[in-house]
Amino acid sequence: PEQTLCGSDDMCDPAEGGTSACARGSYEAGEAPICCPTGVKVELYEADHYPWRADYCADMPPGAVCGSNEMCKSSVCVDGICQDSFQNDLERCDDSGDCASGGGCGVGFYSVTADRVCCSGGAPTMSLNKPDSAYSDDYCTNLPEQTLCGSDDMCDPAEGGTSACARGSY
């Protein structure tokens, strides 16, 4: 039966009310395997022992702890939580597959503290070195005027911008 501890798929017999899928119920360290409520599982890197792999329940509802989009019924896992749908522009994301607009998931403006968000209007991202760092990240492009930028290519001429990134004051 559902939510029953198990050691193999055979212990989750559909004839007995089970789901035929035995896997960890959420993406948390030390999580014990259960008969998956949805009967679906996916193999991922373990939450607590990278690079080992383990089976995790899939098709999980919004609010469930996840480690990959593959675990969620909506196919959207952001910050380790299954979301109810794809993310809208400027909502937090982990990767471009989380975004409803089909655009990129990038740092919202040129700052070390800015969050990763779905870029406005389906805009793509570009890779730039982080401010004062040798490491790079993906940043949203087509940014409106008065937005912190790190490259001319981040600015949107269609929004009245000039495709020029410059200091706002001296």
Image: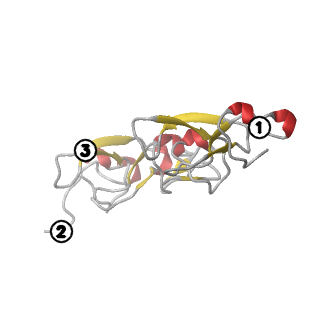
- SS label for mark 2: loop
- SS label for mark 3: strand
Which residue occupies the foreground of this view, 114 or 51?
51
Q: Is residue 133 above or below residue 75?
A: below
- Residue 57, labelled with which disc? none
Q: Nearer the viewer, mark 3 or mark 1?
A: 1
Badge 2 crowding class, 10 Å Cα cut-off, few under 14, some 14 to 19, many 20 or more, is: few
> Label 3 amino acid?
Ser
Residue 103 in view (yes/no): no
User: Where residue 150 sits: x, y (%)?
Assistant: 23, 51
Q: Is residue 27 above or below residue 51?
A: below
Q: Nearer the viewer, mark 2 or mark 3?
A: 3
Q: Image point 13% across, 68% down: which residue?
A: 170
The residue that label 3 is drawn on is 136
- Residue 169, labelled with which disc? 2
The residue that label 1 is drawn on is 19
User: Where residue 44 sits: x, y (%)?
Assistant: 51, 36
In primary-sequence order, the first of circles 1 and 2 is 1
Q: CA distance from mark 3 to mark 1?
A: 44 Å
> Label 2 amino acid?
Ser
Which residue occupies the foreground of this view, 157 or 123?
123
Residue 69 in view (yes/no): yes
Corner quadrant of residue 18: top right
Marks 3 and 1 in Cβ contact (< 8 Å): no
